[in-house]
Amino acid sequence: MLRPLLAVLAAAILVTSCAPVNRQGPATAPPRTVPVAAVPPSAEAGAPTATVVVQAPASISVERISGVISDLGVYDITYPQVSGTPGDDAVNARLRSIAENDAAWFVGDLSEFAVLEEESTDEWWEGVPSELGLAGTVVYTDDRLVTVRFERYWYPSGAAHGQHSTQVMTFDAVTGEEVHLGDLFQPGSQWLAVLAPAVVEAFVSVYGDMVRMTALELRAAGIGGGRSVGVVADGMEISFDSYSVGPGVLGSPWVLVPWAAVLDVVDPDGPAGHLVRWPEA
């Protein structure tokens, strides 16, 4: 039984890495105008509001990688592809690699599971297949930025429940390079001293007493400038790993930190400078 099964798994890995199963696309959305009008609840009189109307020149299509591995598992992955921006080749390659790496990892994980199941004499496998779901969505785009959020669900066969996680990243629409958190702030500024309490406040506002305050404060104080960040019109999305600041039911918790909360340290010439409105002098 094991040899034919591993042959099927090996073939699936090869298909996934070279020509993914059931790759579908594109389903193209036309260029659109994205109006945004958001006033953070905490904004005081005279504080900036990220109110902008920008033309989004990028067209977005969606591609899919899906497959069934014998009776062991099923995966369904969708990811966006961008066209109409100077940096779309680099952006698309990164998004595609995330999807294909997830598929290859899942198939590889099932191959190890097959070996364990074959070698075990216990009836510990209940026959519920493993599952991987990954959905990538463009949550913001303008002529300078493209922000994508991946929502991931993984259920390993035999587990009590599945696991949810979130991954968000922003790309420079011109160069195709990823924009990191530290890129948003003025060089040499004490931006973390401003951002950390804003992150804590946002998490408490959203999740209340479900967060573990000590863990949250430590995580917020240790945010590095090289981490991924989700830049949108009215702020930045900040997330933490599952179980790091609260119970597993939160998944990978994330919040939106409004531009008004970090006004003093945002770089007006940086990737997000065009999204922030400073008070008139």
Image: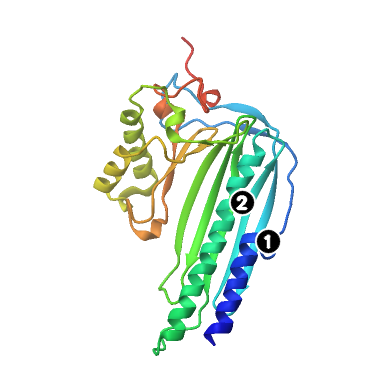
- Mark 2, Cα crowd under 10 Å, few <14 / some 14-19 / many 20+, is some
* Viewer-nearest residue: 253 or 270: 270
Give the CA separation, mark 1 to mark 2.
12 Å
Residue 133 appears in the rendering:
no
For label 1, the residue is 19
Mark 2: which secondary structure?
helix
Q: In this view, does 104 lie above or below 1?
A: above
Dot placed on the residue nearer the N-terminal end, 1 or 2: 1
Q: Where is residue 40 in the image (x, y as percent from the top left)?
A: 46, 32
Disc 2 designates what residue? 96
Q: Quadrant of the N terminus?
A: bottom right
Indicate which disc residue 200 carries.
none
Along the line of sight, the residue nearer the viewer: 15 or 198: 15
Q: Which amino acid does label 1 sit on?
A: Ala
Colour scheme shown? rainbow
Which residue lies at the image location 29% right of the left edge and 38% below the top edge? Answer: 221
Q: Nearer the viewer, mark 1 or mark 2?
A: 1
**Horizontally, is 280 left or right of 202 in the view?**
right
Query: Seen in the image, is 264 located left or right of residue 57?
Result: left
Quadrant in the rendering for residue 249 = bottom left
The residue at the point 60 percent across, 36 percent down is 176
Residue under the point 64% across and 35% down: 87
Task: Looking at the picture, tell me which residue is in the foreground, 55 or 114.
Answer: 114
Secondary structure under the numbered disc 1 in the rendered image: loop
Res 83 seen here: yes
Looking at numbered disc 2 in the image, what kind of residue is underneath it?
Arg
**Relative to residue 58, is residue 12 depicted above or below?**
below
